[in-house]
Image (spheres, rainbow, N blue to C red):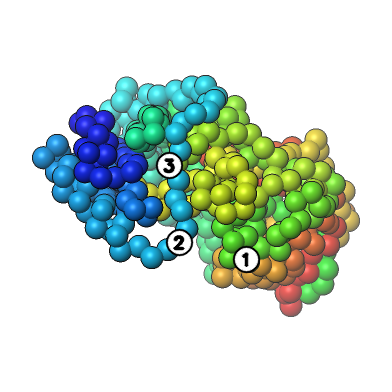
Amino acid sequence: MDLKKLINRGIELGLAEIEVYSSESINKSIKVENGKLDSLNTKAICGYSIRGKYNGKMGYVYYENISEDMFDEIVNKIILNASMITSTEEEILFDGNAEYQTVVNEDTNASDYTNLDKINLLVELEGKLKAVDPRIVKVAHNSYMENISKTRIINSKGLDLTRELGYLGAVCGVLAFENGQSTVGYAQSVAKDFNKIDKELLVKESTDTALNALNAGSAKTGFYETVLNRDCMSQLLSAFTGIFSSEAALKKMTKLIGKEGEKIFGDNIVITEDPFHPNAIVKINFDDEGYPTKTKNIVENGVFKTFLYNLKTAQVFGKTSTGNGFKAGVESPVRVSTTTLYLQPGTKSEEELIASIEDGIYITDISGLHAGLDIISGDFNVQSSGRLIKNGKLADPVTLFVVSGNYYDMMNNVVEIANNLEDTLTDTHAPSVKISKLAISGK
């Protein structure tokens, strides 16, 4: 499909500007249960999101497939949709006049392996999971996935960019049971190379999580020195990333309005977005508006440095886009979103953080996070599980307690940050952290 012809036809029929965002992806998922194939699904998705400016308004259309004989229909629909818009906010197409960092996204080698190879991987994993301990009574989830996508953005202002991304991986979940109590544990490994799916990690993390939570008791209500493991801290960081969004600032839904350059967290907190991190499973050098991405500290030594902007919000605030305009899907509008974002790690191991606590709690699981937080105030209230810490060592498992606090306060009370940031970064990540005081509601 020659998309330049569609661009030219749009201008001929009266559009001031026109842009085509096209996406093609192939997703495969395989599940195995009890040594047999449970499901194998391959889905190919293709879509075109096309927008054009007419009389100062931007009209949108979406098609799963297009052909040259549809070009007039497409443009006329854009004109009709633009004519119905009453919003006064101007939308911008980027002209591509910028420097883009060169990135190399290696292809996956998924095609070098047959479906039988992938099924056998899951059969092997299932056997290893069941053999760990007789208290592992069920492999509740055992799946392989792969995703390959190609995106192109082309417009009448000279922009023409393409990126191809891909990854593969596996997810395992187990159910453990003892003394009338059941627990679950999950683990994921994502890679580019089929042979680098970390089977040992999948088995150890999922089974350790489930087994270590068996026979859990209750925690006494009080304030505790706390270690949040990296999964829990990553979830909290992800849940509160919206406070850095310029869209939240537009809606008055963040306390950080007007606080650029001010200290908001502890001195040891550095939050970085790095689309080119060596450990990022995919590296992205332009956003879904075609604007170049860049590495930046959002918080540096506790100081709030910048909101995240797309072209639209940057214009409203008189700023420059930070390359954070992304779609949730081809049909979705561009919103402010992130690439690889993480809390910078420290130098001590998680074991050293635990060893420094005489009487505390090690939190391994949190649930109900989005229902239990207020992004404006920063307050959170989440159900949790974990282990007591006694004399620097992990002790009895505890469950069904509630952790309450305020995100801003918590990030000012981070005493130590561990060095266990994950080796493969896919989205938002954090290492384990030691917090001087968190409120625990138990028995």
Which residue is pictured at 54% across the width and 25% down the height? 99
The quarter of the picture where the N terminus appears is: top left
Q: Is residue 165 left or right of residue 22?
A: right
Give the mark, 3 or 2, whose residue is nearer the N terminus: 2
Q: Position of residue 178 (x, y in %)?
A: 56, 63
Distance between mark 3 and mark 2 Cα atoms? 16 Å
Q: Under tag 1, what secondary structure?
A: loop
Q: Position of residue 14 (x, y in %)?
A: 25, 45
Q: Most extreme residue toward the left, as rendered?
A: 69
Give the mark, 1 or 2, whose residue is nearer the N terminus: 2
Residue 88 numbered tag: 2
Asked if the residue under mark 1 is in contact with the one under mark 3, i.e. CB atoms within 8 Å, the reply is no
Count of all numbered marks drawn on residues in the image: 3
Which residue is pictured at 62% across the width and 53% down the height? 317
Q: Under tag 2, what secondary structure?
A: loop
Above or below 56: residue 322: above
Q: Is residue 251 left or right of residue 30?
A: right
Q: Nearer the viewer, mark 1 or mark 2?
A: 2
Q: Nearer the viewer, residue 193 or 275?
A: 275
Residue 253 numbered tag: 1
In the image, what residue type sits under mark 3?
A: Leu
Q: Residues within 10 Å of mark 3 (few under 14, many from 20)?
A: many
Q: Position of residue 210 (x, y in %)?
A: 57, 55
In the image, what residue type sits under mark 1?
A: Met
Residue 93 numbered tag: 3
Which residue is pictured at 45% across the width and 28% down the height? 192
Question: Can residue 342 be seen in the rendering of this structure?
Answer: yes
